[in-house]
Image: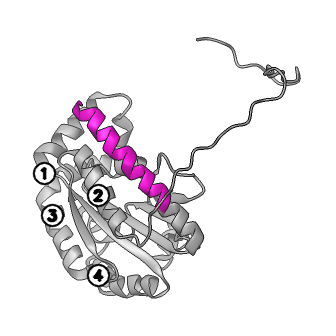
Amino acid sequence: MGKRKAYQKELEELQTELIGVTRWLRQSGKRVVVILEGRDAAGKGGTIKAMTESLDTRAYRVVALGKPDARETSQWYFQRYVEHLPSAGELVLFDRSWYNRAVVEPAMGFCTNAEYEHFLEVCPSFEKLLADDGIILIKYWLAVDQEQQEERFADRAGDPLKRWKLSPVDIAARQKYTEIGKLRDIMIERTHAAHAPWFVADFNDQKTGRLNLIRHFLEQIPSREFVDTPVKLAKLRGKPQKEHVTDKALTVPRVY
């Protein structure tokens, strides 16, 4: 079996267990938040896609917030994230999160030093409130070496289908690899707690990184059993029908 087929086989088995997680969430009413942080091109988006592509779209939400507008900037820092927290039975995955203020913002000069220090001071209390209310909070840092990151940047720059992923901030942050690493370590040291732990996943190889992260995530969940019972379809009565849509609708041209 080739590497790609082996990866796909492992991923499908993990995705089956993820379906079990969403069923457990629905039955128990529990709430789960997964935070995915890491350098640009680490693999956050691909990991979220791998985790969710086989799930019922009503069982999860992906949150990837852009730059705050003037109104949001005037609010309590955590406010725009709070409205995206899960309701009973939901899984919410944050593609970057409130931790922007711990790494990206200070590295790029988007916040003051006072705002940065205040965030590190109050973030543990904020997350303790979430945990005390019953939210299961799991935080991942996707680690990637600079050489590997540069290869991915070059791949994106040369591919029209991926070029949109490169923002001016991403390009500017390339020169701050060391600084971002120092900020990351401070962030983890100041905000790691039993109720909101940080886990580091090696993402120099994205495929094995995804498999390891998903397996680890599954092990943090109390129940993920899922019995896939085959569905037997009764035979249709009569002959299969063609779909005839009213002429009031417009037709998409058959170009292909």
Callout 2 crowding tier (Cα within 10 Å): few <14, some 14–19, many ≥20? many
Vertical arrangement, residue 164 with respect to residue 37, above or below: above
What residue would you read off at disc 4?
A: 120
State yes or no: discs 2 and 1 in contact (Cβ < 8 Å): no
| Residue 178 screen position, x and y as percent | 11, 60
Count the numbered circles shown.
Answer: 4
- Measured as percent of width and height from the top left, residue 188 is found at 22, 74
Q: Alpha carbon of mark 4 to alpha carbon of mark 1: how far?
A: 25 Å
Separation (CA) of disc 2 from disc 3: 20 Å
Residue 226 % position (x, y): 49, 58
Q: Secondary structure at mark 4?
A: helix
Residue at horizontal 28 percent and vertical 83 percent from the top: 193
Residue 181 is labelled as 3
Amino acid at circle 3? Gly
Examine the rendering and report whether any part of residue 166 can be seen.
no
Left or right of 226? Residue 117 is left
Q: Residue at x 23, y 74 (%)?
A: 187
Position of residue 248 measured from the top left corner of the image (x, y, whole percent): 88, 24
For image coordinates 31% across by 46% down, the residue present is 168
Camera-near label (2 vs 4) is: 2
Sequence-wise, the earlier of marks 2 and 4 is 4
Whole-angstrom CA distance, mark 1 to mark 3, is: 11 Å
Q: Residues within 10 Å of mark 3 (few under 14, many from 20)?
A: some
As drawn, the label of residue 145 is: 1
Picture quarter with the N terminus = top left
- Taking the magenta stretch, the answer to whether it contains residue 9 is yes
Residue 12 in the magenta stretch? The answer is yes
Foreground mark, 4 or 1? 1
Front residue of this view, candidates 169 and 137: 137
Q: Quick one: SS at disc 2?
A: helix
